[in-house]
Image (cartoon, rainbow, N blue to C red):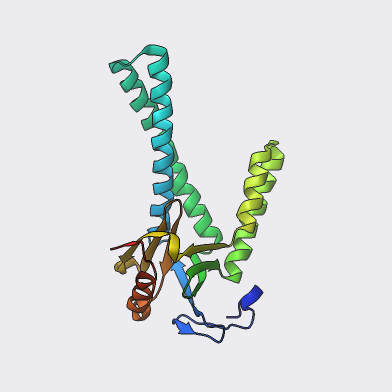
Amino acid sequence: MATTGRHARIRCDYRVRLYEDGKYHWLYDFHMLKNPMILIEVYWALGVTMAIFMCIIFLIGACSEGLNLETLEFTFEVTGITAAIFLVLGLLGYLLYAAVMEWEYPIHFIMDEKGVVHRQAPRAKKAARRIGCLTMLVGLLAKRPTAVGAGALAGSRTTMSSEYAFVRKVKAVRRHHTIRVNERFSRNQVYVCDEDFDFVYDFISRHCPTAKIC
């Protein structure tokens, strides 16, 4: 498969190889139904959001009604109902995205001495643009500028990178072909086939001086 931009001359496959630009390249087709790692990240983000939401509801109740059992019950009731709604919407949104992507998320990884880059492969970019355009259209019809902006971002963001100097944790999830590369405020996931898993995991681990290796 030919890549675009600065790496237009690189033609990589599904094995990790060092190319003429001095970087390792490989492709990975992430199956969105068989591998739950992206869905786990979606729910992790929703969990953080719900924790913040719960704190806000509790503070509002405490300021208006005081610290008592009723405040706690109200906080957990509102948070529980909202979490259940988010749980269903998150799953439906994930399945819709997976269907648009034809159940696979093709990724092009680029790894060197400084960091690892996660890029959408060309056919994934096309699907992301379709989703972005759909979101923008819904936003325009509903007269919601924030939805239009979200759609524009969804259609344009195709790359995520992790610099080793800022990585705080590297964790192998071998059964899902995943290496978590987490910074303080960013969570990246590197996917690689079984044959090259140890090489990529060891390479990333060696180059992250401040990271906890799991």
- The one of 40 and 87 positioned closer to us in this rendering: 40
Residue 125 figure quarter: bottom right
Q: Position of residue 40 (x, y in %)?
A: 38, 53
From the viewer's side, name the closer residue of 211 and 145. 211
Position of residue 54 relative to residue 163, above or below, is: above
Query: In the rendered view of the protein, which quadrant contains the C terminus?
Result: bottom left
Q: State the residue lying farthest toward the top.
A: 65
Asked if residue 117 is positioned above or below residue 96 in the image, the reply reads below
Q: Residue at x 43, y 43 (%)?
A: 46
Expressed as whole percent of the image width and height from the top left, the position of residue 205 reads 35, 70
Is residue 87 at all visible to an observer of this figure? no
104 on left or right of 132? left
Q: Quadrant of residue 199?
A: bottom left
State which quarter of the image contains the N terminus. bottom right
User: Is any part of residue 159 visible from this angle?
Assistant: yes
Q: In the image, what residue occupies the spot 45% across and 67% down?
A: 30
- In the shown orientation, is residue 51 left or right of residue 136? left
> At which x and y percent is residue 48?
40, 42
x then y, percent, for residue 165 = 44, 63
Residue drawn 39% across the image and 71% down it: 207
Q: Total marks drawn? A: 0
Relative vertical location of residue 81 with respect to residue 27 in this rendering, above or below: above
Residue 201 lies in what quarter of the image?
A: bottom left
